Image: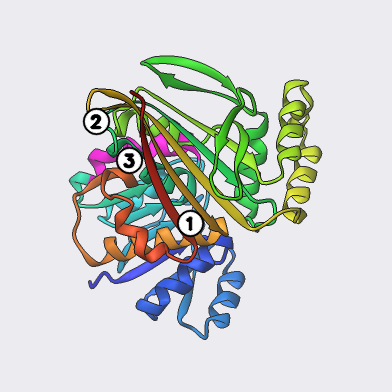
Amino acid sequence: MLKDKIVVIGGYGHVGQGICQELAKSYPGKVYAAGKTLSRAEAFSQATDGRVRPLQIDIREIPGEQLLAGVKLVIMCLDQQNTAFAEACLRQGIRYIDVSADYRFLSQVELLHSLAAANGATAILSVGLAPGLTNLLSLQAAGLLDKTDNINISLMLGLGDSHGKAAIEWTIDNLRRDFHTITQGKRQPHASLTDGRKTDFGGILGRRTAYRFNFADQHILPRTLQVPDVSTRLCFDHAFLTWLMSVLKRIGVLSMLNVGWIRKGAVSLFSAMKLGEPLFALKIDAYGELKGQPAHAECFLQGTEEAAITARVAVLLAKKLYAAEMEPGVFHIEQLYRYESFEKNLAGIADLSSRVTVRT
């Protein structure tokens, strides 16, 4: 059977729609917006004049071979509780892209490397802004040095941007959660929204204080880049709100997000909030050595609409994975690509600059 279908799970959602619409320009009639609610998939299909087709798939159920017959590539835009669906795809030799930001889940998918390799399937993780572009820019910053001892990743999100419900729920849940990283080979505990660090985001954004947050990249990069100390911090474009959230965390107020109705209210509030600009900014600070001297490499990336850039990165990867055979197995984006592979296609929604300072 000819395998030429592209199935986007969560294809009628916030990020999934953008992925489907872009891919349908190159592969009309071969892109399927899938999810558990067929009526929503059909409504979206009609809005695209049938260029995107509807498909009903419930990821809580293990798909049979018939359901995925003829599928060449699956793009997962939904959070999953286990790896059963990913396993079913890889077992059938289906190529797989996952935009999940949750490292607890990504670490489980990493364990499927042998399964993917045995069935000739390639899976790519860390696809989006963070993890994703943060991984690629960390690779670029580290490449500017001869030796990299630590990398500090800082992410600014604009409160005027539009985010999907799942992304907001993930952020709300991690406001209250503590986490740990492996630093210099040792397990280190961290509380979210603590350990503030002044970061220069460049241009008109200037210096802002960003706080520890449980993004997946800081768990991944110590292994993939062989850098012993990686940290990721978050701030918003409204400095006062960033400071207020850190205070609420410190005095224990954010622990109330454990209460169901309070969490639901917080998700609704963040969904409706439009206080700033629809922007994002990344700053990578890599410290190490260059030509025997202590050195500091910086990469700056600024752009608009986080969901749009997540969709764009996923689309660019999908086209690469759809068109060519790649090494089978499970990989994070920085293990297969460099930022240069995407830079031209991200022009207009993201601008990159970098510099290296050598301290003599």
Q: Can residue 11 be seen here?
A: no
Give the magenta part as a residue range. 102-116
Q: Residue at x 53, y 78 (%)?
A: 45
Label 3's element?
helix
Amino acid type assigned to the residue bearing label 3 in the image: Leu
Q: Which labelled disc corresponds to residue 310?
A: 1
Rendering quarter of residue 340 = bottom left
Q: How is the image coloured?
A: rainbow
Distance between the Cα atoms at labels 1 and 3?
18 Å
Evaluate if marks 2 and 3 touch, with contact meaning CB atoms under 8 Å apart.
no
Neighbourhood count class around disc 3 (C-alpha, 10 Å): few under 14, some 14–19, many 20 upward: many
Taking the magenta stretch, the answer to whether it contains residue 109 is yes
In the picture of the structure, the residue carrying the numbered disc 3 is 139
What distance separates the C-alpha of mark 1 from that of mark 2?
Answer: 30 Å
Asked whether residue 131 appears in the rendered view, the answer is yes
Looking at the rendered image, the quarter that the N terminus falls into is bottom left
Does the CB distance between marks 1 and 3 fall below 8 Å? Answer: no
User: Which element is circle 2 on?
Assistant: loop
Name the mark on residue 209.
none
Type of secondary structure dominating the magenta stretch: helix
